[in-house]
Amino acid sequence: MFKEENSTLPPILNAFEIYFVKDFLQPETERADVDAIRKIKSTYGIKRNWQGDPCAPKKYLWEGLDCSYDADNAPRITSLNLSSSGLTGEISADTSNLLMLQSLDLSNNSLTGSVPNFLSKLTNLTVLNLKRNEFTGSIPRELIARSDNGLLLLRRGAEAIVVHVAASSASLFSSSSSLSSSPLASSTSGFNRDSQFSTCNRLRWAEISFEEVRRVRGFNREEELSLFWCSAASG
């Protein structure tokens, strides 16, 4: 750029800057899912860096979550992995509000109580991992049925088996230190060791109900208890 010899004015420079705005915004996660996962976080005191929107933007998806992304709909939480997260207490009822959940992994924690019926209401659930917790009670029948039908992959490392043991078998337990090898007889409720324990690798703990026994060492009242901590071979 230079000045012309016959010019009486200094050089004039005109410049244009052109900007293009590209929309990178993603829709926010479905409000019901956001509320549910935040309540789950609060219930268990989860220490992960869960901040902002759980699913959006996709690049900053919360650890342990997977979401569905559809151009016409808000993202939904489809997978929740809380394995080895130090969880205690019972399974949070807020889990039932994650209606699009397909996979739920709660393994390797210290969860207690029974496996709740509301899990069977999660109709999209195809994987449920409950291994290595401290649950008592039985698995809801609806979940067992879905597992048997191949609709649900159910991993359960500890399950409860409620039995009534005949009075004639009481003496077997008063001094037995290895219940997994005790010669259990058929009980008043039709319990059969071969059929009920065929999937058990190891029995860690047992509490027995003797309906007709009043005086058995270690038991002083009639009550129904349960056999639990049975490691299933199907694992």
Image (spheres, rainbow, N blue to C red):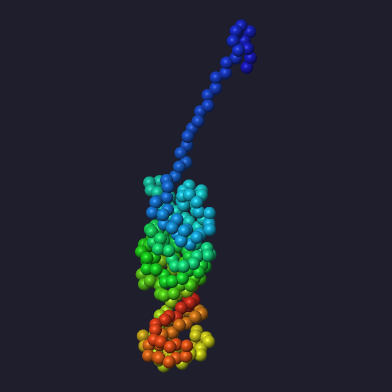
Query: Residue 154, image x and y in percent?
Result: 44, 68
**Which residue appears at 41% of the width and 66% of the height?**
152
Q: Quadrant of the N terminus?
A: top right
Determine whether, in the image, residue 143 is placed left or right of residue 218.
left
**Which residue appears at 63% of the width and 12% of the height?**
3
Where 148 falls versus 223 (above or below)? above
**Which residue appears at 52% of the width and 86% of the height?**
178
Q: Quadrant of residue 223?
A: bottom left
In this rendering, the count of numbered labels is 0
Residue 8 in view: yes
Query: Residue 156, image x and y in percent?
Result: 46, 71
Query: Residue 82, image x and y in percent?
Result: 49, 62
Where 32 falls versus 203 (above or below)? above
Front-most of residues 57 and 195: 57
Q: What residue occupies the far front of the structure in this picture?
A: 220
Q: Quadrant of residue 15?
A: top right
Determine whether, in the image, residue 176 is placed left or right of residue 76.
right
**Which residue appears at 52% of the width and 63% of the height?**
85
Residue 156 in view: no
Q: What residue occupies the far top of the structure in this picture?
A: 6
Query: Residue 105, image x and y in percent?
Result: 47, 64
